[in-house]
Image (cartoon, rainbow, N blue to C red):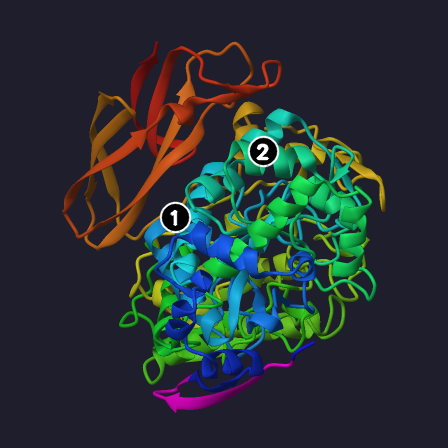
Amino acid sequence: MQIRAFAFLVIAAAGTMHAQVAGYKSDKFDTFEKGVSAASRIHAGEIFVDPTAPLEARVDDLLGRLTQEEKASLIHGCSILEYGELPRLNIPGIGMADGPVGVRGPAATKFPSGISMASTWDADLIREVGRALGRENLAAGNRVFLAPCGDIMRTPLGGRTFEGFGEDPWLIGTITVNYIQGVQGMGVAACVKPVAANSQEKWRRSIDVRVSERALREIYLAGFERAVKEGGAWSVMGAYNKINGEWSCHHDRMLNGMLKDEWGFDGAVITDWGAWKDTAGAINGGSTIEMPAPKPGKGAGATLRLLAENKIDKARYEDAVRRNARLLIRCGIVDPRRKDRAAISTPEHQALARKVAEESIVLLKNQNGLLPLDMSAIKSIAVIGPNADWKLTRTNYRDSGGSASVFPPYEITPLAGLRAKVAGRLAVHFAEGYSYEAGAAASFEEGKAAAIEAARSSDVAIVFAGTNHTYDREATGNVRPEEADKPDLGLIGPQPELIRAVAAANPRTIVVLINGAPVTMTQWLDQVPSVLEAWFPGMEGGRAIANVLFGDVNPSGKLPVTLGKKLTDWKVHTLGPDGYPGTGKNGHVKYDDGIWIGYRWFDRARIEPEFPFGHGLSYTTFNYTNIKIRKQDAGWTVFFYITNAGMRAGAEVVQLYVQPVSSKIERPFRELKGCAKVRLSPGETKNVEITVTPSHLRHWDGHAGKWVIESGDYLIAIGASSRDMRLQIPIKVE
């Protein structure tokens, strides 16, 4: 295994630390760069090193120069995080790095969590994040980024909910597509993960997911389909679990049938680490790259023996090798390196991380206009709660969330952000109230008393509550699989009691939630006037939260998930153990909730959520007016106006839902199929256009085995959330 050395120059400037790459050493890259130039090699007839030649011509040329052993070596990784080294041709291995919130390894920018990114509902912003992540991967010597996470939140207990983009396939697809385009625009392959139905950490390496074809198509694979067709993903990662009796990484029908043949995917299929069960089964089933490197005796030689014994289908093998060679060429591994693109944890990237955090914060409740805080009208604030000064970036892999761990050069906590914001102007009284490290029973009564005193002696109290990566985490390291998902929907420890006590001491109490997945608020919500959902906000989170609290930033985040009141509000948690978490190691879990995920179930069962999907308030108000529609060959274009009717500039996420008036089969009441983030000055009006295509109206017909668009009447509804429709207009499908 090659060891890479990174030297970082840490610079202090205006109270902010940032890291720059001062040096990078890789013998493989150095040898390549100092060797024969690309131009002279092209003159020698080596088309594969010519960046101006057509992609497939380069692939053909490279494959024509490889020995059988070298072709077989492309089926397997070189080490834990390297792939594709071909020493005879002077081709270095590709470095891979985990994501999705930053590059794991060097001191890199830590962006807000995936669920935070989805809360921005801002495709352009996420594409910018992707470009920054691409640059940071290049600076760290990587050409494949193991991100984004395109899976669905089936249960709010899922340990990796924080990594994904929520509960809705359309929103997930939109965020995923733009993330991929940003990363790959820098010449780094995005590896969309994990395919598919990997919605829980409990027994994730062995559980057999029993799921209907309709649910797979409409819910669990829909985001991946868009990642391939619209995002042009260069690679995908297979999951650990089985689907209907077949390992995901050996799943001929899903990987070969759907992914490659139906969707036209021409990239590499990389297994999750250790999910390659046997070489013949994996290659025949559609996987193309085994990661990490196989054990001695299980690599290229063994693959060639299986091929000679006809245990590996020759066409599948040759297709896999070609896809893997295509990945090498696409990643530019034989091209002159674009050092001008490489940058890591720069001030610009840190500012982008702060912007994403600011735009992801969701104002859930703001009774009597308590927020934003007016610094000229108050003299003191109490800062309370276990997340006030808790750094989510811990010192180890496990306590930072697992493979999503990123270790930035610094992390601004909420307390630090607020102190910097009000320095010299307001008094800050800090009382933790409850400590994660102390545990639920030890120093709480004493801590609560200090918190009450701080709240009583301050003009405003802010409680930073929620969870951390002991709850929201991957099943990795020494985390036992049966304990990997969250144990319940509550906050950690006696936080509800702490919030109630603080609110009783000071009626001007604000709760800021820092967490990776939905939590219940029923025990305290009615007792506090204002609530912000900040998710896991990344390295600049403290500054972003302070900017929202004091009105420098008008919140515009919208929920990418439904926030229920109790666990059984989600259908999955009405199905008993068979529905979740399943029957144990090597057992099964039945996805009998089918397509009824998130708001689709809340609508069907007429459950009143705590806060609906798409919800998010602002410090201003928006009016929607004058909806019109125009039929076009490609569908329909919906036009309407939105006006900022308040006194502050702000952004509104307008959401388009499609509602069938009648149907021959049971369908969701309405489904999200479009959105636009509109920025408006006070009093400003803008015209908004959103296109609806026939594909937005389709559903999967299990009997016919195909997508179907029913004729009949539909309503196009425009709203501020899934439960707040402002405009609607009918369309007819002949």
Task: Work out whether residue 331 can be spotted.
Answer: yes
Q: Is residue 421 above or below residue 288?
A: below
Residue drawn where x is 51% and y is 35% of the image: 263
Q: Is residue 534 left or right of residue 583?
A: left
- Binning the other alpha carbons within 10 Å of mark 2 as few (below 14), some (14 to 19) or many (20 upward) gives some
User: Residue 121 — which label?
Assistant: 1
Disc 2 marks which amino acid?
Met
The one of 356 and 239 positioned closer to us in this rendering:
239
Q: Is residue 148 left or right of residue 239?
A: left
Q: Is residue 623 left or right of residue 40?
A: left
Q: Is residue 700 above or below residue 72?
A: above
The one of 594 and 243 positioned closer to us in this rendering:
243
Quadrant of the rendered image containing residue 293: bottom right
Q: Secondary structure at mark 1?
A: loop
Bounds of the magenta segment: 3-17
- Which residue appears farthest toward the front when viewing the image? 44
Q: Which quadrant, please, contains the C terminus?
A: top left
Disc 1 marks which amino acid?
Trp
Q: Earlier in the sequence, mark 1 or mark 2?
A: 1
User: Residue 566 — which label?
Assistant: none
In x, y percent, where is residue 465? Answer: 56, 62
Q: Is residue 343 above or below residue 112?
A: below
In x, y percent, where is residue 618? Answer: 32, 50
Q: Secondary structure at mark 2?
A: helix
In x, y percent, where is residue 22? Answer: 45, 88
Query: Mark 2 sits on what residue?
Result: 258
- Binning the other alpha carbons within 10 Å of mark 1 as few (below 14), some (14 to 19) or many (20 upward) gives many
The one of 299 and 442 positioned closer to us in this rendering:
299
Q: Which quadrant, please, contains the N terminus?
A: bottom right
In x, y percent, where is residue 89? Answer: 56, 70
**Secondary structure character of the magenta stretch overall:** strand
Question: Does 14 lie within the magenta span?
Answer: yes
